[in-house]
Amino acid sequence: MDGFVKVRIVQANGMDLSQFQFDFDLTFATFFMNADMTLYGRFGSRSDFKDAMRDMSLEGFQKALGAALELHKEYPANSASLIGKKGPESTFKVPEEYPSLRKYKPTLDYEGKVARSCMHCHMVGAAERMIFREKHKPIPDEVLYLWPMPEVLGMTLDSKDKARITSVAKGSSAEKDGFQTDDDILTLEGQPMISIADVQWVLHVAEAPTTLKAEILRNGQTVNLDLSLNEGWRRNSDISWRTTTWDLRRMGTGGLVLEELPAADRQKAGLADTELALQVKHVGQYGDHAVGKKAGFKKGDIFVTFDGKTHRMTETDLMAHVMQNRMPGERIPVTVLRAGTRVDLELPMQ
Amino acid sequence: MIRYITALTSLLLLVSGLVLAQDRDTKVHNDRKVVQATGLWIYNDLPKGIAEAKKTGKPLLIVFR
């Protein structure tokens, strides 16, 4: 770490959104950069609510640090390979330009209510979705299923390494494309990969359908592969863990948190594997998060019909359906199983 | 009696909210003090970090946390 000038940023206020594009649901996100703001790489990944460290490790961070220093030594000879690491210019220059974030100032109020003056990173992600929702437009896949983990394509990367594959799911698109366990992803779309976050970045900005050029190291040999991104590939993502999903729940389920019923409980309830069975695990109590409560939903209710649909869905699937097909003001018919009895209710959209 | 309990509950919530908010503010202030005292990190000042990186020739490690 002594090889770096270390800067810690504790707020989203005033953040240059064209320069700093990262998963705003993270509580730890790192950029390795040149002083001219050329980006060498990112570090910081998450895919679970309770276990924030599942996709990160000190070993992985150390490897990313070392790789960033190597890229810095080669710079500017390697500058062409780094161009793609920076995203397109942002519509909003800084977060305070978002309509829902206009109350925030560009700096913290250290002389006053400093905590209240602080904009959290996840607020930027929520503000981006609000742009669509307030215009009654569907939230696109790339805004809903953002920063996809490589698992979405069937490959799991080692959190203790840069971009090493630890497993490839059978029948997955990664397997069909020829990726194998122990492959090291050296570059993706010509960009050097120094972390899982770097892989996520390329996936995040990719427009499907497409194929991404991958250079991998396998048994000491460099192999070139194509990584296929088919139409709708992002929809395998799970967004339930995200802090920003709380705002989706406010808008789409009136503050209800839903989880799939475990197999044994499905059987007891007489529900087949292919049927909808989302149980209410939490009912919001205040303000807009209590809309579900006021509509009569209770903890323990099992959704068996939602907007005319009875097929199996995850909470993510249900949220995506609502955010892309149902607008504020609409009322969605829902049938729940409550103590063995079917109850018909309506869920107002916000 | 009910109005008295409601008023007391509201007052307790207000006071605990103020205490909680004060704790959060104190935490933010203390965080800045502690991190700055280590001398290892430039705290919340990107222009200063960029200037230091230009001066030293070192790359930047920018952490959002």
Image (spheres, coloured by chain):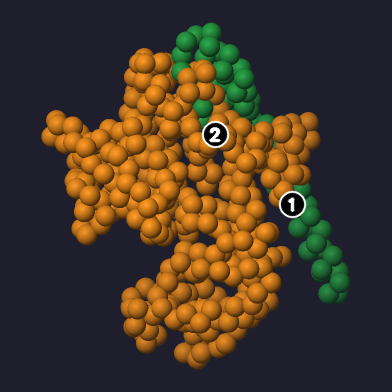
> On the same chain: label 1 and label 2?
no
Where is mark 1, residue-wise?
B17
Q: Residue at x 45, y 43 (%)?
A: A205
Three-letter code, disc 1: Gly
Tell me, for residue A20, which label it has, or none.
2
Q: Nearer the viewer, residue A37 or A208?
A: A208
- Classify residue A263 as left or right of residue A180: right
Residue A228 placed where, x, y %?
Answer: 30, 50
Q: Is residue A293 visible?
A: no
Colour assignment, chain A: orange
> Which chain is rendered green in the image?
B
Alpha-carbon distance for marks 1 and 2? 34 Å
Q: Is residue A145 above or below residue A212?
A: below
Q: Chain of mark 1?
A: B
- Classify residue A111 as left or right of residue A311: right
Residue A148 placed where, x, y %?
Answer: 41, 49
Three-letter code, disc 2: Phe
